[in-house]
Image: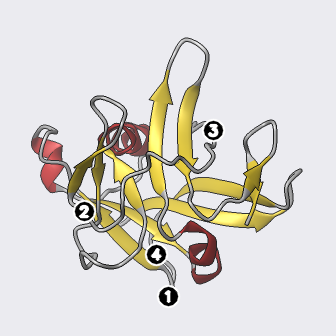
Amino acid sequence: MVQLQTGTPSPSAPPSGTNHSASKQPGQAVLSALNQPPNQKGVQVTERALRRIRIAMAKEGVSAEQGGLRLGITGGGCSGLSYNIRFDTQPRERDRVYEFASEQAGNDAFVPVKVFVDPKSFIYLHGMVLDYEETLMRQGFNFINPNSSKSCGCGSSFSA
């Protein structure tokens, strides 16, 4: 099971459109999609998130060649919008599909991990970075979203 934690916009979030940019946190390389033009705002993931997505996909039996991680937004939650994260076996017709591969991973680095974003969710997710955090206090994915104007106390919803 994939757990979700959300983050609020961070002034130290790296600019989009860079291949491997270093953020303020040590050891956190941000990856842009392989199929994304350098000047386009899209979705980015960190090395940690990419490793965790690969582990979870293998555990859930989702093929990296066809399936991927679906990121989305639904109405609801204390702040108005909630993040959704789940696996899907294939993209839908109008999805934006981002492919991520890591130079620092092992042999599985050459099989890109796909991230699917539907058109309505893209409005709120463009420019965001998906990170993964594992500490003594919590573990899960963090959405570092510059489009979020405020988030609730539980961190699973936001408003734009």
Disc 1 on helix, strand or loop? loop
How crowded pointer 4 is (Cα within 10 Å; few <14, some 14-19, many 20+) is rated as: some
Dot 2, how many residues are within 10 Å of its Cα: few (below 14), some (14-19), or many (20+)?
some
Q: Which residue is mark 1?
A: 93
- Earlier residue among tags 2 and 1: 2
C-alpha gap between disc 2 and disc 4: 25 Å
Question: Does dot 4 land on a helix, a strand or a loop?
Answer: loop
In the image, is 110 to the left or to the right of 70?
Answer: left
Amino acid type at image mark 1? Glu
Looking at marks 4 and 3 on the same chain, the residue that comes earlier in the sequence is marked by 3
- Residue 156, compared with residue 148, is above or below; it is above
Check residue 101 in the rendering and tell me which mark sits there, or answer none: none
Q: Amino acid at mark 3?
A: Gln
The residue identified by callout 4 is: 91
Amino acid tagged 4: Pro
148 vs 45, left or right, is right
Q: Earlier in the sequence, mark 2 or mark 4?
A: 2
Work out which residue is located at the far front of the displayed protein and give it. 11
Mark 3, other Cα within 10 Å: few <14 / some 14–19 / many ≥20: some
Foreground mark, 2 or 1, reads 2
Name the disc covering residue 5, or none.
Answer: 3
Task: State if disc 4 and disc 2 touch (CB < 8 Å).
Answer: no
Distance (Cα) linking label 1 and label 3? 28 Å
Say what amino acid the circle numbered 2 marks: Thr
Marks 4 and 3, how far apart in space?
24 Å
**Reading the chain from its start, which is encountered first: label 1 or label 3?**
3
- 5 shown above or below 111: above
Check contact, mark 4 vs mark 1: CB within 8 A: yes
Residue at (22% x, 68% y) in the render? 34
